[in-house]
Structures are given as structure tokens and as C-alpha cells.
Amino acid sequence: MQRRNLLKHLWAGTVLGGSSLLLNQSLTASSSEGKMTSPPRGLPRLKITDVRTIMTAPNGIRLVVVKVLTSEPGLYGLGCATFTQRAGVVQAAVDQYLKPFLVGRDPDEIEDIWQSSYVSSYWRNGPVLFNAMSGIDMALWDIKGKRANMPLHQLLGGKCRFAADLYYHASGRDFQEVEDNVRKAMEAGYRHVRAQVAVPGLATYGTRRTGRSAMSSVAGPADSGPTSPVDVWEPGAYVRIVPRLFEHLRSRLGEEVELLHDVHERISPAQAVQLCRDLERFHLYFVEDPLPPEENDHFPHLRRQTSVPIAMGELFNTQQEYVPLIANRLIDFIRIHLSQIGGLSPARKVAALGEYFGVKTAWHGPGDVSPVGHAAGLALELSTYNFGIHEGYVFPRETREVFPGCPEVRNGYLYANEAPGRREAGREVPVSFG
Ligand code: MG
């Protein structure tokens, strides 16, 4: 291929809202191009020539990114496969099993690749295999967007909104510190804030420690366990303090700011009912994960007992788990962790189902979702009518250096990076169509 034509076909970065992992390792013409048979009119047929996993931890959080290379020189896609707690097994699933299964296939066949990968191991589901499949799936959507020379949200139906509204995480050791942090978020432009407070002397979720429990003074970390607890979790103390936190916040901040709270699946069904009822008068935007997924059968009872909007599902492993909760109108927001259920393709289907039942999207999106995953979620959010909220995460400098073209946080919104992509004198410049 002539250099001029080669450069014409080189696309640096990704159309997943502009997240491009530019590691100076891929924009070279593949030598493994196969001969194309019966090329269709229009776009040339492609083959997958290589699949790579990229492990990075720019801020101490292990991120897994999958890179799918194609027979078109320089055309590749990126996808998020981050299962930060078990990153190595995801890497093995991609490198040892999905790569040999997919090299040589047509990357345009996204749905068929997803379905055939799903049954390729016979035993399926689970965070390892689905994160691996997610890396492939998002990368294939990325490739298709680049092929079409469109931002991904255009392929998915076009923009419904200019950006995605974010919610900010505010926490504190006491009510005043939480209030101060909510105010800081509001001053930065956020209209939605999640509030979590520490339980004095006890462990909880979403806050820094306030100090060890009384029992911990005699037990070091090496001694921790059921007979010598270090961080004691007491659900009773937790469900008593949370309503008092929101009473404090509403009395100081008024009703205008949207407040959220994450239970993090840690209380009994009876406590969940009581807590949600106690929180009703504070008009929360949603209460997240009031029950663990093992207690899904309690949702009809919870729903009958409270009017609090419920967000659920970051621990779900498959898209099928959402169906009964949506179809029976038992929840209000789906907390899909995109890579956990296999990528953008299944998340898109669940979002479409939710549209018919008044259920909105609220993808799970803290720091253990890579910027590629955030960008994929953002592409769906921009084009999904029943979008609800995007979990806010301000990408640290080190992360933005590894992932140039990150979606941008401004005034409490997440914006896709819409800078045009180009290649200049051999230097890679991130594309961002999204
Ligand atoms: Mg959560």
C-alpha cells in the first residue's frame, strides 16, 4: 500500500467517546493480511489478525484493556475487560482462549462473535469470561465506528443529549464533613451527589475509616478473622445512622440537590425495607443495591413497602438477571457494570428493555472501570432515551496520560471528546469522534 493510502487508513484512538490507549505499539501495517475473497461493494472485508491484552495500573487500580487488530493496516479497536480483583485470569481467558477462537473472523460480525464466544466454552457466564468477551465486544464496536467514520453514538441512533449528567461521591467521618463535601461538589457544578458517612468505631462502605473498633486494639491484620475481628460491620448501627445523615443534609442543603446513597448489598431484607421507608421523606434520587443479588426474590416485597427509587445490579453477571426485575417493575435504575455482563452489546439490549418499563440507566462506573469502559458507556448514554445518570469519576492525571482522549468532566457533566482524529508526521494523535 502506498504511504499516502496507508496514512489515509490509519486511525489512531477509538470512537468510544475518544478514549484511546496510545501505547505506541500498534499502528503498524499488519503483515498477516489474508487474501480477501469476494470483497463486498463499499467497505472492504476485514479479518481479525491479532488480539492483545494490555495491563496497566496508572493509579494503583489494575485495568485490563483488549486490543483487536484487523487486516486493515492501522485499524484496531479497544475494549474494557477490567476485573481488577482478578485481572490475570481475564488476561488468560483472552490470550489463551478467545484469541485463537477469533483470529481470522470478520470483525464486522459483532453479534455473531458475541453469541458464538458465549457458547464456545460450553460452560459460560461469570465475571472472568464476560470481562474477556467485553474487551472483544467493545473493541469490535470501536472498529465498526471507525469503519463508518462515525462516532459510536451515531451508529447507535444519534445523540439524545449533549452530555451525560454525573453524580459525585461525597463521604465523611461525620455529618459535617459529608455536608462540606456535598457543598464542594455543588460548587463544582454537580446536581447529583452520593452521600456516605462513617459509622463511628465500625466498618462501613464508601468512607474512610474512623478508627479501629474496640476489639481491633488487640488484633492486627494478621489476626483478623471471625474469632479476632479487626473491622466489625454492624448493619443495625448502619441503618440507624443513615437516615440521620440525610436529615442533616436536607436541613442544611434544602431540596434542590439530588442526593443518592449506596447500601452496597450489606443488610437483611427486613432492614432494607425499614431503611428505604426511613429515607422516603428525604426524596433521594435513588437508593442503590438495598439487597444482594442472592436476595432478588425479596424485591416484590420491598417494592410494595416503599416509594424510594431503587437502583440495582452492579453484581449481576448476565443480562438475563435484569429481566424479571425490569419486567415486573421492581427497580428504577439498572446498575450494569458493562464489562461484567459481556460488554456494550448486552448492555444495549437491557437498556432497550428498560425503556418499555420506565427503567433508566445508571451504569456502574467508579475507578475500576477503565476510561475505555466509561467511553463505551457514555456512547450508549448519549444515544439512549432512558438514560438516567452516569456514576462520576474524575480521571486522575496519570490515567489521562495513559488514556489520552478520556471523556471530559465539566460542570457535573461527562462530555465525549469530540476533537477530530488525525495522524501527523508519524505521531499518533487520539481520535475522538464521540
Ligand atoms: Mg455500588
Image (cartoon, rainbow, N blue to C red):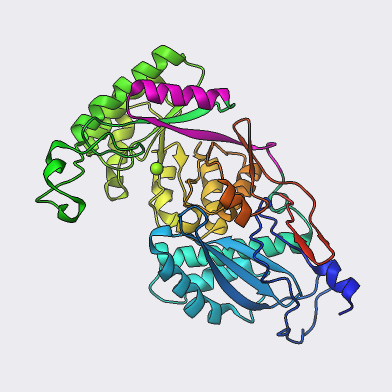
The boundaries of the magenta stretch are 159-187
Q: Is residue 36 left or right of residue 218?
A: right
Q: Is residue 200 left or right of residue 95?
A: left
Asked whether residue 184 is drawn in magenta, I would say yes
Q: Where does the image place residue 210, in percent across and percent down from the top left?
A: 28, 34
Q: Residue furthest bottom?
A: 35
Q: Is residue 42 visible?
A: no
The residue closer to the viewer here, 246 or 177, is 177
Q: Where does the image place residue 101, in percent across and percent down from the top left?
A: 54, 80
Query: Which corner quadrant of the figure contains ligand 1?
Result: top left
Q: Where does the image place residue 23, in percent across and percent down from the top left?
A: 64, 65
| Count of labels in the image | 0
Q: Residue furthest left?
A: 227
Q: Residue at x 25, y 39 (%)?
A: 203
Q: Where does the image place residue 66, in percent across and percent down from the top left?
A: 57, 67
Asked whether residue 101 is drawn in magenta, I would say no
Q: Is residue 347 above or below residue 245?
A: below
The residue closer to the viewer here, 316 or 183, is 183
Q: Quadrant of residue 4?
A: bottom right
Q: Quadrant of the N terminus?
A: bottom right
Q: Is residue 380 left or right of residue 119?
A: right
Q: Is residue 51 visible?
A: yes
Q: Quadrant of residue 80?
A: bottom right
Q: Residue at x 46, y 39 (%)?
A: 333
Q: Is residue 256 above or below residue 364?
A: above
Q: Is residue 390 left or right of residue 25?
A: left
